[in-house]
Amino acid sequence: MTDLLCVCLIKFEVLYGSLSGLKFLFAGKMDRGKKSSKLLANKNSKNHMDLQDIIRESALPFLPAKSLHRCTGVCREWKLQISTPFFAHNQSYSFRDVSGFFCQSPSGTPSFVSLNRMAYGVPDPSLKFLPEPVDIRCSSNGLLCCQGRTGYQAYYICNPVTQKWKKLPEPTANHGTDPAVVLVFEPSLLNFVAEYKLVVAFASDLDGFEFEIYSSTDGFWRISAEISFGKMKLLPRTGVHVNGVVYWSSSMGRIFSFDLSCERSTFIYNNGCSSLGAVNGKLHTACVQGSKLSVNELSNAYANTMQMNSSTKTWQAKHAVTLNFPVPDLYPRSYDKETVLFLGGDMVVMRFEKKLISYNMKTKEFTEVFTEEDTYSRMVPYVNSLVEI
C-alpha cells in the first residue's frame, strides 16, 4: 500500500505540481549517512533504491511526454533513464491517454489545444519542422498523419514531440481533396520502431469505394481487391480503428466498416450518432441530443441478419448523461452532429461554442478546457507519446 501511495503522489506532483517535493525527496540521497550509524545509512540506502525502482517501473513510463521532460530536472538518474530509446519505447506502449487536439482552420496553420497544459504539450504546435505546409488528417497513439499542399500532396507521418517524420511515397489512386483516411498504429513491446498502416477509402470508377493501404513494414501502397458498391458518401474525419477493423460514418446514417484481416467491407445500421470511438476494445458511438449525452456500444454487427423477432440488438446503451455545466448559456436545445469531438478510453470530449468539455465515463466528472477561438474546421485527438518512427 505504501508503494502504491508513493506512485500516486509522484504522478500527482508531476502532472499538477512544481516537482519541488520530488527534488527534495531525491536530494536526500546526497545527505544519507552523514549523521547516522552505518547500519542506518545502509537501511536508508536500500529504501531509497527500492523507491527509485518503484518510480522507474511503475510511474515514469505511464507519464506523458511533456511531464517527462520536466522530470529530467529532478535528478541525473531520471534524466539518463528518460533519454534512453528503451524508455521511449516503454512509454509509448504504456501511455495511451488522449492529451489534446491538433486544430486547424481552412488553409491555416496547425495549433495544439492541451487538455492539461501542465502535463501535455509539444515543442512546435505549428508543425513547422515538416518540409512544407500541411493539413492535419488523423492520428493514432502518438503518431500524427498530415498531408502536404504541394506536388502530389504527400502524406507525412510524424511525432510532434520528437519532431521526427517520414514522407510516404505517392499513392496509386486519387484520394481526393479531403480523403477518408485512417492511421492504424497499435504499440507493441516487441517492436522498437513503430509499425503502422494508412488506410484510405476512395471513390471508385465503378460507382463505389475502393481501398488503398500503405504499410510501413512493406514501404509501399497497395490497392485492395475489395470494392464496395453504392452511392453513399463517407464522412472523411470520422474514421476510427477498433481491433483490426476500420469504421467510418456515412452520409446516409449507416456505419461503413473495412476488416483489415480479410479485406472485406460491410455496412452497419447506426443509432443516429455519427461520432465513433474505441472503448474497451469495442466500437462505441456518442452524440448529444438536447441536454443528453448518449454513448452506445456495438454489441452485434450482424443483428440485422438474424431471424425475425430475435432479441439480439445491434447497439447497447452504455451511458445516458444529463449535461450539467456551470455556464447556463451553453444549453441550446439541440446541437449539431459535430458536437462530440472525441470518444475513446474513458473520455468523451465535446465542443460547445468556445469551450471544450470533457466527460470521464469512469468518474462521471465534467472538466472544462478553454479554446482561444471557435473557427477550427478540423480537430484531431493526439496522445503525448515518445514513440519512435
Image (cartoon, grey):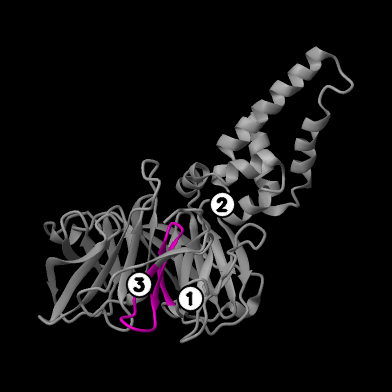
Q: Amino acid at mark 1?
A: Gly
Residue occupying image coordinates x 67% and y 48%: 71
Q: As rendered, which of 258 and 130 lies closer to the eye?
A: 130
Report the magenta residues as a range: 135-156
Q: CA distance from mark 1 to mark 2?
A: 23 Å
323 to 151, vertically: above or below = above
Tell us which disc is closer to us: 1 or 2. 2
**231 vs 323, nearest the viewer:** 231
Q: How many marks?
A: 3
Query: Looking at the picture, does residue 97 appear above or below residue 248?
Result: above
Residue shown at 66% from the left, 38% from the top: 77
Cβ atoms under marks 3 and 2 closer than 8 Å: no
Q: Is residue 19 magenta?
A: no
Q: Amino acid at mark 2?
A: Thr
Residue 171: percent from left, percent from top: 24, 73
- Residue 186: x and y in percent read 36, 52
Residue beneath label 3, please? 155
Q: Specify the label residue 290 is tagged with.
A: 1
Q: Is residue 83 left or right of residue 39?
A: left
Residue 17: percent from the left, percent from the top? 73, 52
Of 93 and 338, nearer the camera is 93
